[in-house]
Image (spheres, rainbow, N blue to C red):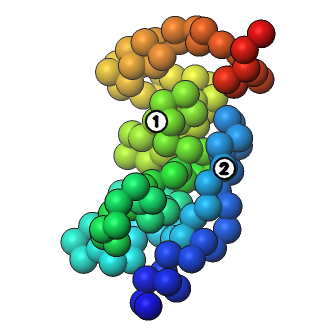
């Protein structure tokens, strides 16, 4: 019964870059039903729907440490380096990041095969 209140969605998370939406059940750094887990950022979290284990959860995303945009954890939208940063802010401030992050961002510039406006469409 305790998990019913903890797992009930508080709202719907929406990434401001890719428009991913998912119901979240917690916002913060220590998800419910976890004793020793402390996240490094205030995150939007949902219970893992793929397991009956109530201690399992998925991190959906958090706010960009520079602009405050709500972004998902997807590699096309953000990266974590001491805080979460949206990729537009990373690109604008690329010189402020270590060489490893700059190289990682270069690898991400591979163009996608399908435009984002047409996910899953076949013609």
Query: Percent x, y for residue 39?
Result: 35, 61
Query: Percent x, y for residue 76?
Result: 55, 28
Per the image, label 2 sits on a secondary structure element best described as: strand
Residue for badge 2: 21
Badge 1 crowding class, 10 Å Cα cut-off, few under 14, some 14 to 19, many 20 or more, is many
Residue for badge 1: 79
Query: Percent x, y for residue 118?
Result: 75, 21
What is the number of the mark on residue 1?
Answer: none
Quadrant into which the N terminus falls? bottom left
- What residue is shown at x 53% (from left), y 60% (from top)? 44
- What residue is shown at x 48% (from left), y 16% (from top)? 108
Quadrant into which the C terminus falls? top right
Please name whichever residue, 123 or 60, is drawn nearer the observer in this view of the structure: 123
First of labels 2, 1 by sequence position: 2
Instruction: Give how far apart the Cα atoms at labels 2 and 1 are.
Output: 18 Å
35 vs 52: above or below? below
- What residue is shown at x 46% (from left), y 36% (from top)? 79
14 vs 35: above or below? above
Q: Quadrant of residue 48?
A: bottom left
Please name whichever residue, 3 or 76, is drawn nearer the observer in this view of the structure: 3
Badge 2 crowding class, 10 Å Cα cut-off, few under 14, some 14 to 19, many 20 or more, is few
- What residue is shown at x 52% (from left), y 85% (from top)? 5
């Amino acid at each position: 019964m305790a998990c019913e209140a903890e797992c009930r969605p508080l709202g719907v998370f929406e990434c401001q870059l890719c428009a991913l939406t998912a119901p979240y059940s917690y916002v913060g750094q220590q998800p419910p039903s976890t004793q020793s887990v402390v996240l490094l950022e205030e995150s939007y979290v949902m219970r893992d729907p793929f397991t009956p284990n109530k201690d399992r959860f998925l991190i959906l995303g958090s706010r960009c440490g520079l602009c405050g945009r709500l972004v998902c954890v997807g590699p096309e939208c953000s990266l974590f380096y001491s805080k979460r940063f949206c990729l537009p802010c990373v690109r604008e401030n690329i010189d402020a990041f270590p060489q490893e992050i700059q190289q990682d961002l270069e690898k991400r510039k591979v163009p996608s095969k399908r435009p984002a406006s047409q996910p899953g469409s076949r013609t």
